[in-house]
Amino acid sequence: MPDMLVKLYELPPARPVVEELSAKGITIRRALPPEKHKVTKWVLETFNARWASECDVAMAGLPPGCFIAVREDTGAREIIGFACYDATCKGFFGPTGVLERERGKGVGKALLLVTLHAMWEQGYGYAIIGGVGPAAFYAKIAGATLIEGSSPGIYKGMV
């Protein structure tokens, strides 16, 4: 899968989608260091060990390079999605994932935009989305473009 490039200085605003989710009881926020064990365990159990490893690295930064989507129903809090940056390489967005039952509701869009805006605020001009799956999603939401000749890219030779 190829990588994609995002111009962080041309991002659409994140606020409208974040506010829409908030009205539905879903909060998008930066994960806190004391949540590292819960977040990485959730990523491992929901997705895979590779993503959990990347999440662990992203959580070790200050500030943590991991955002989470949390659904709050009747006092209970449940992680329903996550997005990381600076995990495998500086300037890289990902991994990211949303519970299957929560897809198509704007959670992935909000996580993507909030994370990319955080990267911009930290001084990045561009972000690379490594080894993309849903290229059309990233192009539509963030204006991402394919990087020619980037597959397998940094993941070449991985064990």
Image (tube, rainbow, N blue to C red):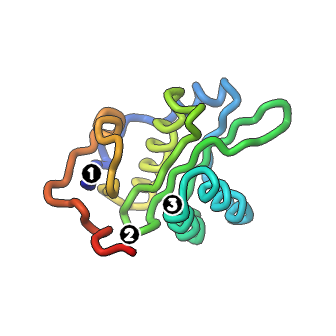
Mark 1 lies on a secondary structure that is strand
Image location (x, y in percent) of residue 91? 36, 63
Residue 12 x, y percent position in the rendering: 37, 35
Q: Quadrant of the C terminus?
A: bottom left
Numbered badge on residue 62: none
Residue type of the residue flagged with mark 2: Cys
96 horizontally vs 92: left or right: right
The image shows residue 77 at horizontal and vertical percentages of 77, 42
Which of the two residues, 68 or 15, is positioned nearer the viewer here? 68
Would you identify the image quadrant in which residue 81 lies? top right
Residue depicted at x 43% and y 35%: 13
Q: Which of marks 1 and 2 is nearer the N terminus?
A: 1
Q: Quadrant of residue 19?
A: top right
Residue 16 in view, yes or no:
no
Residue occupied by mark 1: 4
Task: Determine the CA span between mark 1 and mark 2.
Answer: 14 Å
For mark 3, give the secondary structure.
helix
Q: Image check: 91 left or right of 64?
A: left
User: What residue sits right under mark 3 in the picture?
Assistant: 51
Q: Which amino acid does label 1 sit on?
A: Met
Q: Residue at x 61, y 50 (%)?
A: 46
Mark 2 Cα-neighbour bin, 10 Å: few <14, some 14–19, many ≥20: some
- C-beta proximity under 8 Å, tags 1 and 3: no
Residue shown at the point (44%, 65%) measured from the top left: 86
Marks 1,2: beta carbons within 8 A: no
Q: Are marks 3 and 2 in contact (CB under 8 Å)?
A: no
Quadrant for residue 78, please give it.
Answer: top right
Q: Earlier in the sequence, mark 3 or mark 2?
A: 3
Q: Is residue 51 above or below residue 146?
A: below
